Amino acid sequence: MNEKFKSILYKSDLTKDEVIYLFSLSDKDEIAQLYKRSDEVRKEFCGDDVHLRGIIEFSNYCEQDCLYCGLRISNDSLPRYRMTKEEILTTVIHIVKAKIKTIVLQSGEDSSYTKEFIVDVIKSIKEKYDVAITLSLGERSFEDYDAWKKAGADRYLLKHETANKKLYSAIHNKQSLDERIKHLEYLKSIGFQAGSGNIIGLPGQTIEDIADDILLCKKLINDMASFSPFIPSNDTPFHNVLKADLEMTLKTMAVARIVLKDAHIPSTTALGSLIENGREKGLEIGANVVMPNYTPNPYRQNYKIYEGKICITDDPLSCAGCLQFKIEALGRTISEDKGDSLKTK
Ligand code: SAH
């Protein structure tokens, strides 16, 4: 191994230039070394446990108009749905029965779900089950976040999408990167375990931007960070944009593991949709989380953020078993605890 490469791989803090250097590797052996190192860092800081997070995508209505996302308000060809409290709670039972200890409630930005409604759902879950709750509802008021934390929610996922301010403004309708960062900082300040992350392969995005994405997650001391490949969605302005490059996606996840060390990093459904066995690949190069999709039929196929999302016609009840099998085949174990932030330990 060349000396510069070796010293970067084993450094505890990487500069932006060093991150870019790793992204620029083209030699197959060196790329293999990078993946070997990220897997080692994962093992050292997170162990062999893979955390399963059961996700319920309870509404695909969205008030935002993000150019990349199939749920955007301007997409009037998408059949929309909203799940009732009873439907959400029935789905929670399925997740609990599968011994999964984290419930992720995700939706488009849908203000028809009031602060009070979400409080009620959180309390109903927490009263009955010993599980962690992750919310992923987009930007809401700080008052809403306060109420949900008080009601017992544990974590909040709000991806920063891109750390490039100009690009952020260009691909979002009225949102700004500064505002998003304020939300992330606020969520952390009131005790949420917070997760952020990017989309890889946005038009106009550079590898410098992706390096900034990883370093921003570090600066925000994210408990969780998700790096997912862009996949085009029909009926969006980005329908003709090429899907993300696989190698760049894997390099990003690997370097993120080396830089972020003990952050929870998912092997995303988008990676699984980009290539066959993508989620297994992600777990081998640094990821330690997978999110089985419990959104019930017939809604499941309409949470169509991008085209070709895997498992949308499956019976949700078979998802966890299928993933469990794949994880064990990699020689990894399924976590039996809630998989809280490793940063609070
Ligand atoms: N409304 C919530 C949840 C959004 S969907 C929120 O705003 O946080 C979850 C994630 O899907 C987004 O954060 C985004 O990173 C990702 N996403 C959206 N469109 C995508 C696409 N075309 N390809 C890959 N990921 C996409």
Image (cartoon, rainbow, N blue to C red):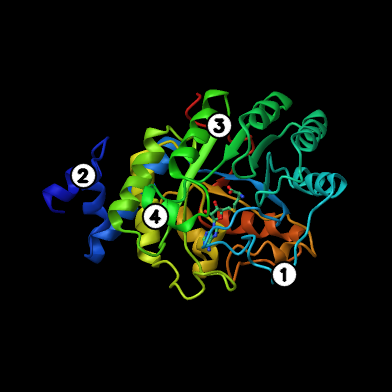
Tell whether 20 sits left or right of 309: left
Q: Earlier in the sequence, mark 3 or mark 1?
A: 3
Q: Are marks 3 and 1 in contact (CB under 8 Å)?
A: no
* x and y, in percent, of residue 168 in the image: 43, 52
Q: Residue at x 66, y 54 (%)?
A: 62
Q: Earlier in the sequence, mark 1 or mark 2?
A: 2
Q: CA distance from mark 2 to mark 4?
A: 29 Å
Residue that numbered label 3 is attached to: 193
Q: Which amino acid type is shown beneath numbered disc 1?
A: Thr
Disc nearest the viewer among 3 and 2: 3
Disc nearest the viewer among 4 and 3: 4
Q: CA distance from mark 3 to mark 2?
A: 29 Å
Q: Which amino acid type is shown beneath numbered disc 3?
A: Gln
Q: CA distance from mark 1 to mark 2?
A: 44 Å
Q: Which mark is residue 313?
A: 1
Q: CA distance from mark 4 to mark 3?
A: 27 Å
* x and y, in percent, of residue 238 in the image: 49, 69
Q: Which mark is residue 167?
A: 4
Residue 199 makes an appearance in the image: no
Q: Earlier in the sequence, mark 3 or mark 2?
A: 2
Q: Are marks 3 and 2 in contact (CB under 8 Å)?
A: no
What quarter of the picture does the N terminus occupy? bottom left
**Callout 2 environment at 10 Å: few (<14), some (14 to 19), or many (20+)?**
some
Q: 106 or 78, which is in the foreground?
A: 78
Q: Earlier in the sequence, mark 2 or mark 4?
A: 2
Q: Residue at x 66, y 66 (%)?
A: 311
Residue that numbered label 2 is attached to: 8
